Image: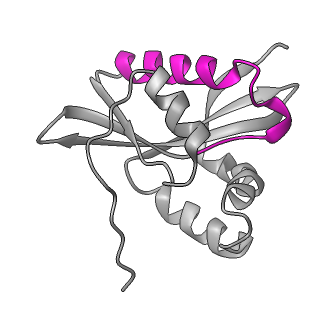
Amino acid sequence: MNFEFKIILNQNLDQVIPLVYALNEGKVSKELLLSRFNEMKLQNYECAGVFIDNELIAVTGLWFCTRHYSGKSVELDHVYIMPEFRNKGLGKEFMSWIQNYVQEKGYNAMELNTYVQNNPSHKFYYNEGYNILGYHFLKKL
């Protein structure tokens, strides 16, 4: 298949809502996702997508920052590939494209969170050279 990897412009971020909605298994409404993405546009956030014939089939957010322990870093967020395109090497290609993109921007580290029960993703990220540094905690206020 002929995949096109690119950054999704802020004015087109609404097209990622169906994929992020599927990732969250409908636990966050599409309306709330749209509201949050409209806020994210104003922060150090970009969104990368994979397209086939202008159809978005994979997505990840990119949060850019400088961290005391890793320097200039990008945190991948809401990594999602539509189920019918999984296990075909697309994830590996997407991660490679993202790595090249962020390195060209001058960033020297990539990090992400993955759900504890998502064992296939753990194996994938290990194989991509990621190491587990700790646990991610969340407290809703």
**Which residue is at the front of the view, 107 or 129?**
129
Q: Residue furthest bottom?
A: 141
User: Where 34 falls versus 89 (above or below)?
Assistant: below
Say whether residue 74 is left or right of residue 91: left
User: Where 137 falls versus 12 (above or below)?
Assistant: below
List x then y, in percent, for residue 72. Answer: 23, 32
Say whether residue 26 is left or right of residue 98: right
Say whether residue 8 is left or right of residue 17: left
Q: Which residues are magenta?
A: 79-104
- Taking the spot 76% from the left edge, 31% from the top edge, the residue there is 86
User: Where 106 falls versus 45 (above or below)?
Assistant: above
List x then y, in percent, for residue 30. Answer: 73, 69
**Which residue is at the front of the view, 90 or 98?**
90
List x then y, in percent, for residue 99. Answer: 44, 20
Judged by its main secondary structure, the magenta piece is helix
Say whether residue 6 is left or right of residue 4: left
Q: Tell me the quadrant of the picture where the C terminus can be found.
A: bottom left
Callout count: 0
- Taking the spot 56% from the left edge, 38% from the top edge, the residue there is 121
- In the figure, residue 32 lies in which quadrant? bottom right
Q: Is residue 89 magenta?
A: yes
- Taking the spot 55% from the left edge, 54% from the top edge, the residue there is 117
- Taking the spot 51% from the left edge, 54% from the top edge, the residue there is 115
Q: Residue furthest left?
A: 68
Q: Tell me the quadrant of the picture where the N terminus can be found.
A: top right
- In the figure, residue 102 lies in which quadrant? top left
Q: Is residue 130 magenta?
A: no
User: Where 134 falls versus 25 (above or below)?
Assistant: above
List x then y, in percent, for residue 80. Answer: 66, 43
